[in-house]
Amino acid sequence: MVSNNQRKQILQLKQKKYRLSSGYFVAEGEKVVEEILSASWECVFLFSTVPNFFPKTVLVNTAEMIKITHFKSPSPVLGVFKFPDAIFPIISNITIAVDGVSDPGNLGTLIRLCDWFGLSELICSSSTVDCFNSKVVQASMGSIVRVQCRYEKDLSTTLRDLKKPIYSADFGGESLYSSSFSEQATIVFGSESHGISAEIDEIVNHKISIPNFRKGRGAESLNVAIAGAIFLSEIFRGR
């Protein structure tokens, strides 16, 4: 059974301010929760409609799960977890940064892409959606435990201090398919609607685009997560 206090706390965690003040976040779905439990992140509450899901899981019915889910339809498992330990910069040849990405599904997918391509850090501007938003956590499909998101108030200074060539995804840039990337590089992705900020644009060394092969009127833009997948595939091809 879910107590009234637990229900209240779980629903409050939809809001970033409560996640930050408590240090807790919500994860839903068997696959996602299993990944987080396997990573030994501290579990505060764990509820499931599936018997014997995990030791110390509280068994609840679907009606109770509906009252605590952060989604339109409940998953069979919901957990409340404590934020992981303090984040430290991770040094790697390729750095991915996001500036102003506000859609949780896109950020979650980018986290999953970083995991797939062996990258353990994603640097985010302060205007990017919180990585512990429950929709981001779900979209990451558990990759959140292997890819740390580092938020920076001054993203331009952070990226400049890496002392690597900075590339941005830009409609007006050189074609991705005729470009080459340095062995060490930083790639920045902005929001679909606004692109990267002026501060980041000033420090970019190379602007790269994914060419549109449609003749005449076609799609106006690519989803940022799809663009990220195409970029990473090209960057790592042959490495």
Image: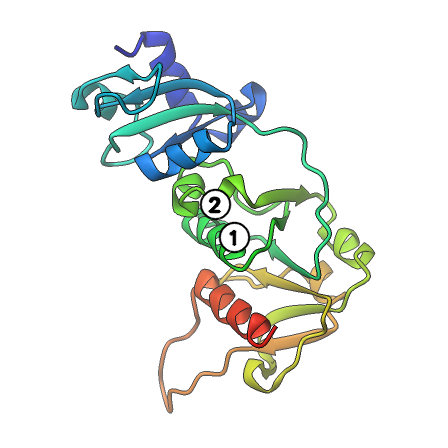
Q: CA distance from mark 1 to mark 2?
A: 6 Å
Residue carrying label 2: 143
Describe residue 15's horizontal placement relative to residue 93 as left or right: left
Residue carrying label 1: 115
Q: Residue at x 54, y 70 (%)?
A: 231
Q: Is residue 110 above or below residue 170?
A: above
Residue at the farthest bottom position: 215
Q: Nearer the viewer, residue 214 or 49?
A: 49
Q: Residues within 10 Å of mark 1 (few under 14, many from 20)?
A: many
Q: Residue at x 57, y 80 (%)?
A: 176
**The N terminus lies in which quarter of the figure?**
top left
Q: Is residue 128 above or below residue 72?
A: below
* Residue 130 visible in the shown view: no
Q: Return the x and y of residue 16 as percentages of the image width and height.
A: 51, 30
Q: Residues within 10 Å of mark 2 (few under 14, many from 20)?
A: many
* Earlier sequence position, callout 1 versus callout 2: 1
* Residue 56 visible in the shown view: yes
* Secondary structure type for disc 1: helix
* Secondary structure type for disc 2: helix
**The C terminus lies in which quarter of the figure?**
bottom right
Q: Nearer the viewer, residue 154 or 37?
A: 37
